[in-house]
Amino acid sequence: MEIIEKPRDTNLEMCLVSGQHFQWTKTDRGFVLWTGKKIWKIEEEGDRWLVQGSGLEDLAYFLSLDQDYGQIFEDLKREEALGPILESARGLRLLRQEAWDTILAFILSTNNNVARIQKSLLALGQLYGDPIGDFKNQTYYSLPSPEKLASIDPRDLRAKAGVGYRDKYLVKTAQMISDGLFRIGGIDGLGYDQALAQICRLSGVGKKAGDCILLFAYGYSQAFPVDTWMEKIMVDLYGPFKSREAISAFGQARFKDQAGLVQQVLFHYIRGLKKKGRGGP
DNA sequence: CCACAGGTGTGTC
DNA sequence: GACACACCTGTG
Protein backbone atom coordinates (compact mmCIF):
# COMPACT_ATOMS: atom_id res chain seq x y z
CA MET A 1 0.00 0.00 0.00
CA GLU A 2 1.33 3.40 -0.98
CA ILE A 3 -0.12 6.78 -0.18
CA ILE A 4 0.28 9.62 -2.65
CA GLU A 5 -1.09 13.06 -3.21
CA LYS A 6 -4.05 12.95 -5.57
CA PRO A 7 -2.74 13.84 -9.03
CA ARG A 8 -3.69 17.22 -10.47
CA ASP A 9 -6.34 17.50 -13.16
CA THR A 10 -7.43 13.93 -12.55
CA ASN A 11 -10.97 12.74 -11.95
CA LEU A 12 -10.58 9.00 -11.77
CA GLU A 13 -14.25 8.18 -12.09
CA MET A 14 -14.58 10.42 -15.12
CA CYS A 15 -11.62 8.72 -16.78
CA LEU A 16 -13.07 5.28 -16.20
CA VAL A 17 -16.73 5.77 -17.08
CA SER A 18 -15.85 7.77 -20.16
CA GLY A 19 -16.16 4.78 -22.48
CA GLN A 20 -12.45 4.46 -23.24
CA HIS A 21 -11.73 1.69 -20.74
CA PHE A 22 -13.92 -1.15 -19.54
CA GLN A 23 -11.75 -3.14 -17.16
CA TRP A 24 -12.58 -1.67 -13.79
CA THR A 25 -14.94 -2.12 -10.86
CA LYS A 26 -16.12 0.26 -8.21
CA THR A 27 -15.23 -0.34 -4.57
CA ASP A 28 -16.46 1.38 -1.39
CA ARG A 29 -13.96 4.21 -1.67
CA GLY A 30 -12.55 3.96 -5.14
CA PHE A 31 -11.83 1.58 -7.96
CA VAL A 32 -9.96 -1.51 -9.03
CA LEU A 33 -8.67 -1.06 -12.57
CA TRP A 34 -6.55 -3.27 -14.82
CA THR A 35 -5.05 -3.53 -18.28
CA GLY A 36 -2.94 -6.39 -19.59
CA LYS A 37 -1.40 -7.98 -16.51
CA LYS A 38 -1.24 -4.74 -14.53
CA ILE A 39 -3.79 -4.04 -11.86
CA TRP A 40 -4.29 -1.39 -9.22
CA LYS A 41 -6.68 -0.67 -6.41
CA ILE A 42 -7.09 3.03 -5.77
CA GLU A 43 -8.97 4.36 -2.76
CA GLU A 44 -9.67 8.05 -2.60
CA GLU A 45 -9.39 9.71 0.81
CA GLY A 46 -9.63 13.47 0.74
CA ASP A 47 -6.69 14.75 -1.28
CA ARG A 48 -4.83 11.46 -1.01
CA TRP A 49 -4.85 8.23 -2.95
CA LEU A 50 -4.18 4.88 -1.31
CA VAL A 51 -2.72 2.68 -4.04
CA GLN A 52 -2.10 -1.08 -4.08
CA GLY A 53 -1.04 -3.37 -6.90
CA SER A 54 1.30 -2.99 -9.84
CA GLY A 55 3.19 0.04 -8.62
CA LEU A 56 3.10 3.79 -8.97
CA GLU A 57 5.36 4.14 -11.96
CA ASP A 58 3.19 1.97 -14.17
CA LEU A 59 0.07 3.61 -12.79
CA ALA A 60 1.41 7.04 -13.68
CA TYR A 61 2.05 5.82 -17.20
CA PHE A 62 -1.42 4.29 -17.48
CA LEU A 63 -3.02 7.52 -16.30
CA SER A 64 -0.76 9.64 -18.56
CA LEU A 65 0.29 11.73 -15.56
CA ASP A 66 3.25 13.02 -17.57
CA GLN A 67 0.76 14.98 -19.70
CA ASP A 68 -0.33 18.40 -18.45
CA TYR A 69 -4.07 18.16 -18.98
CA GLY A 70 -4.61 21.42 -17.10
CA GLN A 71 -2.70 23.18 -19.86
CA ILE A 72 -4.36 21.16 -22.60
CA PHE A 73 -7.81 22.18 -21.35
CA GLU A 74 -6.67 25.80 -21.20
CA ASP A 75 -5.55 25.57 -24.82
CA LEU A 76 -8.89 24.09 -25.86
CA LYS A 77 -10.74 27.14 -24.56
CA ARG A 78 -10.04 28.59 -28.01
CA GLU A 79 -12.89 26.34 -29.19
CA GLU A 80 -15.80 28.54 -28.23
CA ALA A 81 -18.36 26.01 -29.40
CA LEU A 82 -17.23 23.65 -26.65
CA GLY A 83 -17.66 26.25 -23.89
CA PRO A 84 -19.28 24.77 -20.75
CA ILE A 85 -18.98 21.26 -22.18
CA LEU A 86 -15.22 21.57 -21.83
CA GLU A 87 -15.37 22.86 -18.26
CA SER A 88 -17.67 20.04 -17.16
CA ALA A 89 -15.10 17.50 -18.38
CA ARG A 90 -12.12 18.77 -16.38
CA GLY A 91 -10.34 15.84 -14.82
CA LEU A 92 -10.75 13.70 -17.89
CA ARG A 93 -7.60 12.07 -19.29
CA LEU A 94 -6.76 9.63 -22.02
CA LEU A 95 -5.50 6.38 -20.54
CA ARG A 96 -2.71 4.28 -22.03
CA GLN A 97 -4.16 0.80 -22.34
CA GLU A 98 -2.66 -2.49 -23.48
CA ALA A 99 -3.25 -2.93 -27.20
CA TRP A 100 -4.56 -6.49 -27.05
CA ASP A 101 -7.13 -5.67 -24.38
CA THR A 102 -8.22 -2.64 -26.34
CA ILE A 103 -8.63 -4.64 -29.54
CA LEU A 104 -10.91 -7.14 -27.80
CA ALA A 105 -12.90 -4.45 -26.04
CA PHE A 106 -13.67 -2.54 -29.22
CA ILE A 107 -14.50 -5.62 -31.25
CA LEU A 108 -17.09 -6.21 -28.53
CA SER A 109 -18.26 -2.60 -28.63
CA THR A 110 -20.12 -2.81 -31.94
CA ASN A 111 -23.88 -2.56 -31.54
CA ASN A 112 -23.35 -2.93 -27.84
CA ASN A 113 -23.50 -1.07 -24.55
CA VAL A 114 -20.96 -0.49 -21.83
CA ALA A 115 -22.49 -2.83 -19.26
CA ARG A 116 -22.52 -5.74 -21.66
CA ILE A 117 -19.01 -5.06 -22.93
CA GLN A 118 -17.77 -5.15 -19.34
CA LYS A 119 -19.67 -8.35 -18.63
CA SER A 120 -18.19 -10.11 -21.64
CA LEU A 121 -14.64 -8.96 -20.84
CA LEU A 122 -15.01 -10.15 -17.24
CA ALA A 123 -16.24 -13.53 -18.42
CA LEU A 124 -13.41 -13.89 -20.95
CA GLY A 125 -10.91 -13.22 -18.18
CA GLN A 126 -12.50 -15.54 -15.66
CA LEU A 127 -12.93 -18.37 -18.14
CA TYR A 128 -9.70 -18.20 -20.12
CA GLY A 129 -7.40 -15.58 -18.58
CA ASP A 130 -4.79 -15.65 -15.85
CA PRO A 131 -5.17 -14.36 -12.29
CA ILE A 132 -3.40 -11.01 -11.89
CA GLY A 133 -4.49 -9.76 -8.50
CA ASP A 134 -6.56 -10.27 -5.35
CA PHE A 135 -8.36 -7.54 -3.47
CA LYS A 136 -10.87 -8.18 -0.71
CA ASN A 137 -11.28 -11.89 -1.45
CA GLN A 138 -11.95 -11.09 -5.07
CA THR A 139 -9.66 -12.44 -7.77
CA TYR A 140 -9.13 -10.44 -10.95
CA TYR A 141 -8.07 -11.91 -14.28
CA SER A 142 -6.25 -10.77 -17.38
CA LEU A 143 -7.80 -11.39 -20.76
CA PRO A 144 -6.73 -14.59 -22.53
CA SER A 145 -3.68 -14.29 -24.77
CA PRO A 146 -4.17 -14.34 -28.54
CA GLU A 147 -2.85 -17.92 -28.59
CA LYS A 148 -5.35 -19.01 -25.97
CA LEU A 149 -8.30 -17.23 -27.54
CA ALA A 150 -7.42 -18.57 -30.99
CA SER A 151 -7.95 -22.11 -29.70
CA ILE A 152 -11.44 -21.56 -28.34
CA ASP A 153 -14.62 -22.62 -30.12
CA PRO A 154 -16.58 -19.48 -31.07
CA ARG A 155 -19.76 -21.16 -29.87
CA ASP A 156 -18.31 -21.34 -26.38
CA LEU A 157 -17.58 -17.62 -26.44
CA ARG A 158 -21.13 -16.93 -27.42
CA ALA A 159 -22.68 -19.27 -24.87
CA LYS A 160 -20.40 -18.56 -21.93
CA ALA A 161 -19.24 -14.99 -22.41
CA GLY A 162 -22.33 -13.55 -24.08
CA VAL A 163 -20.37 -12.02 -26.93
CA GLY A 164 -23.08 -12.71 -29.51
CA TYR A 165 -22.25 -12.57 -33.20
CA ARG A 166 -18.83 -11.11 -32.38
CA ASP A 167 -17.68 -14.62 -31.43
CA LYS A 168 -16.01 -15.35 -34.75
CA TYR A 169 -14.46 -11.89 -35.00
CA LEU A 170 -12.73 -12.43 -31.68
CA VAL A 171 -11.37 -15.83 -32.61
CA LYS A 172 -10.36 -14.78 -36.13
CA THR A 173 -8.51 -11.75 -34.82
CA ALA A 174 -6.78 -13.88 -32.18
CA GLN A 175 -5.76 -16.34 -34.91
CA MET A 176 -4.36 -13.61 -37.15
CA ILE A 177 -2.14 -12.51 -34.31
CA SER A 178 -1.11 -15.93 -33.05
CA ASP A 179 -0.40 -17.03 -36.63
CA GLY A 180 1.88 -14.04 -37.13
CA LEU A 181 -0.32 -12.51 -39.84
CA PHE A 182 -0.75 -9.40 -37.72
CA ARG A 183 1.83 -8.00 -35.35
CA ILE A 184 0.46 -6.01 -32.43
CA GLY A 185 3.75 -4.12 -32.31
CA GLY A 186 3.67 -3.50 -36.05
CA ILE A 187 1.52 -0.39 -35.73
CA ASP A 188 4.08 1.65 -33.83
CA GLY A 189 5.84 4.19 -35.99
CA LEU A 190 3.26 4.22 -38.78
CA GLY A 191 1.56 7.40 -39.87
CA TYR A 192 -2.09 7.72 -38.87
CA ASP A 193 -3.60 6.69 -42.21
CA GLN A 194 -1.43 3.62 -42.51
CA ALA A 195 -2.01 2.71 -38.90
CA LEU A 196 -5.78 2.86 -39.39
CA ALA A 197 -5.57 0.76 -42.55
CA GLN A 198 -3.51 -1.83 -40.68
CA ILE A 199 -5.70 -2.05 -37.60
CA CYS A 200 -8.79 -2.40 -39.82
CA ARG A 201 -7.36 -5.63 -41.20
CA LEU A 202 -8.44 -7.29 -37.98
CA SER A 203 -11.77 -9.08 -38.10
CA GLY A 204 -14.54 -7.06 -36.51
CA VAL A 205 -12.54 -3.84 -36.59
CA GLY A 206 -13.83 -1.06 -38.83
CA LYS A 207 -13.10 2.66 -38.90
CA LYS A 208 -14.79 3.49 -35.62
CA ALA A 209 -13.31 0.65 -33.56
CA GLY A 210 -10.00 1.12 -35.34
CA ASP A 211 -9.87 4.78 -34.38
CA CYS A 212 -10.65 3.87 -30.78
CA ILE A 213 -7.84 1.33 -30.68
CA LEU A 214 -5.36 3.77 -32.23
CA LEU A 215 -6.38 6.44 -29.77
CA PHE A 216 -6.60 4.43 -26.56
CA ALA A 217 -3.78 1.95 -27.06
CA TYR A 218 -1.35 3.31 -29.62
CA GLY A 219 -1.24 6.97 -28.64
CA TYR A 220 -2.64 8.41 -31.87
CA SER A 221 -4.07 11.43 -30.11
CA GLN A 222 -5.29 12.91 -33.39
CA ALA A 223 -7.75 10.05 -33.97
CA PHE A 224 -11.37 11.17 -33.79
CA PRO A 225 -13.72 8.17 -33.52
CA VAL A 226 -17.24 8.96 -34.69
CA ASP A 227 -20.22 6.92 -33.59
CA THR A 228 -23.91 7.72 -33.84
CA TRP A 229 -23.83 10.00 -30.79
CA MET A 230 -20.71 11.79 -31.85
CA GLU A 231 -22.34 12.34 -35.21
CA LYS A 232 -25.34 14.00 -33.60
CA ILE A 233 -23.44 16.32 -31.33
CA MET A 234 -20.90 17.31 -33.98
CA VAL A 235 -23.72 18.22 -36.35
CA ASP A 236 -25.22 20.37 -33.58
CA LEU A 237 -21.95 22.12 -32.82
CA TYR A 238 -20.18 22.33 -36.17
CA GLY A 239 -22.48 20.80 -38.77
CA PRO A 240 -23.78 19.94 -41.25
CA PHE A 241 -21.59 17.11 -42.56
CA LYS A 242 -22.12 14.64 -45.34
CA SER A 243 -20.78 11.55 -43.63
CA ARG A 244 -19.22 10.15 -40.52
CA GLU A 245 -15.93 10.05 -42.27
CA ALA A 246 -16.23 13.75 -43.01
CA ILE A 247 -16.79 14.39 -39.30
CA SER A 248 -13.76 12.35 -38.38
CA ALA A 249 -11.61 14.25 -40.88
CA PHE A 250 -12.98 17.58 -39.64
CA GLY A 251 -12.26 16.65 -36.02
CA GLN A 252 -8.71 15.66 -36.84
CA ALA A 253 -8.02 18.80 -38.85
CA ARG A 254 -9.62 21.14 -36.34
CA PHE A 255 -8.50 19.67 -33.03
CA LYS A 256 -5.16 18.26 -34.15
CA ASP A 257 -3.35 16.44 -31.34
CA GLN A 258 -6.30 17.05 -29.04
CA ALA A 259 -8.90 15.46 -31.34
CA GLY A 260 -9.14 12.27 -29.32
CA LEU A 261 -9.51 14.18 -26.09
CA VAL A 262 -12.23 16.38 -27.56
CA GLN A 263 -14.07 13.26 -28.61
CA GLN A 264 -13.88 12.01 -25.02
CA VAL A 265 -15.04 15.38 -23.71
CA LEU A 266 -18.06 15.25 -26.00
CA PHE A 267 -18.81 11.68 -25.02
CA HIS A 268 -18.68 12.65 -21.36
CA TYR A 269 -21.17 15.41 -22.09
CA ILE A 270 -23.52 13.03 -23.92
CA ARG A 271 -23.41 10.59 -21.03
CA GLY A 272 -24.37 13.38 -18.66
CA LEU A 273 -27.36 14.22 -20.79
CA LYS A 274 -28.49 10.64 -20.99
CA LYS A 275 -28.24 10.21 -17.23
CA LYS A 276 -30.08 13.40 -16.31
CA GLY A 277 -32.38 14.38 -19.10
CA ARG A 278 -33.77 11.18 -20.59
CA GLY A 279 -34.56 11.66 -24.22
CA GLY A 280 -30.96 12.17 -25.20
CA PRO A 281 -29.22 15.20 -26.70
C1' DC B 1 -43.73 -6.38 -30.13
C1' DC B 2 -40.42 -3.08 -31.57
C1' DA B 3 -36.69 0.32 -31.26
C1' DC B 4 -32.45 0.97 -29.58
C1' DA B 5 -27.66 0.26 -27.75
C1' DG B 6 -20.87 3.97 -28.93
C1' DG B 7 -20.91 -0.77 -36.09
C1' DT B 8 -19.03 -4.22 -39.17
C1' DG B 9 -19.11 -7.71 -42.87
C1' DT B 10 -21.17 -9.00 -46.96
C1' DG B 11 -23.52 -8.46 -51.06
C1' DT B 12 -25.44 -5.35 -54.66
C1' DC B 13 -25.69 -1.45 -57.80
C1' DG C 1 -17.71 4.13 -53.53
C1' DA C 2 -22.50 4.47 -51.86
C1' DC C 3 -25.99 2.02 -50.32
C1' DA C 4 -29.12 -1.88 -47.93
C1' DC C 5 -29.28 -5.60 -44.81
C1' DA C 6 -28.37 -9.02 -41.16
C1' DC C 7 -26.55 -9.65 -36.82
C1' DC C 8 -26.37 -11.35 -30.48
C1' DT C 9 -28.65 -9.87 -26.49
C1' DG C 10 -30.77 -7.03 -22.89
C1' DT C 11 -33.78 -3.21 -21.87
C1' DG C 12 -37.67 0.13 -21.91
Image: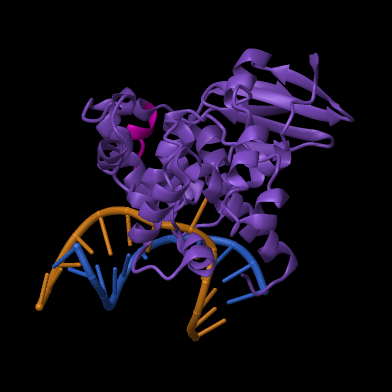
Chain colours: A purple, B orange, C blue
For image coordinates 28% across by 33% down, the residue present is: A175
Q: In this view of the protein, can residue A155 be seen by the observer? A: no
- In magenta segment, residue A181: no
| Res A12 seen here | yes
Q: Dividing the picture into quarters, in which one does residue A42 lie?
A: top right
Instruction: Judge left or right: residue A228 versus residue A122.
Output: left
For the C terminus of chain A, give its image quadrant.
bottom right
In the rendered image, the residue lying farthest to the front is A78
Instruction: Look at the picture and state if A197 lies above or below A279.
Output: above
Give the x, y percent position of residue A179: 23, 27
Above or below, A279 relative to A111: below
User: Percent from the top left, x then y, of residue B12?
Assistant: 12, 74
Q: Which residues are magenta?
A: A148-153
Instruction: Please state if B6 lies on the left or on the right of A209 as rendered.
Output: right
Tell which of A97 and A7 is nearer to you.
A7
Q: How many marks?
A: 0
Residue A118 lies in quadrant:
top right
Given residues A97 and A173, the one toward you in this image is: A97
Image quadrant occupied by the N terminus of chain A: top right
x 67%, y 27%: residue: A139
User: x%, y% of residue A269?
Assistant: 65, 57
Which of the pair A34/A72 is nearer the observer?
A72
Question: Nearest the camera: A126 or A233?
Answer: A233
Residue A274 placement (x, y as % from top left):
67, 65
The outermost residue toward the right is: A46
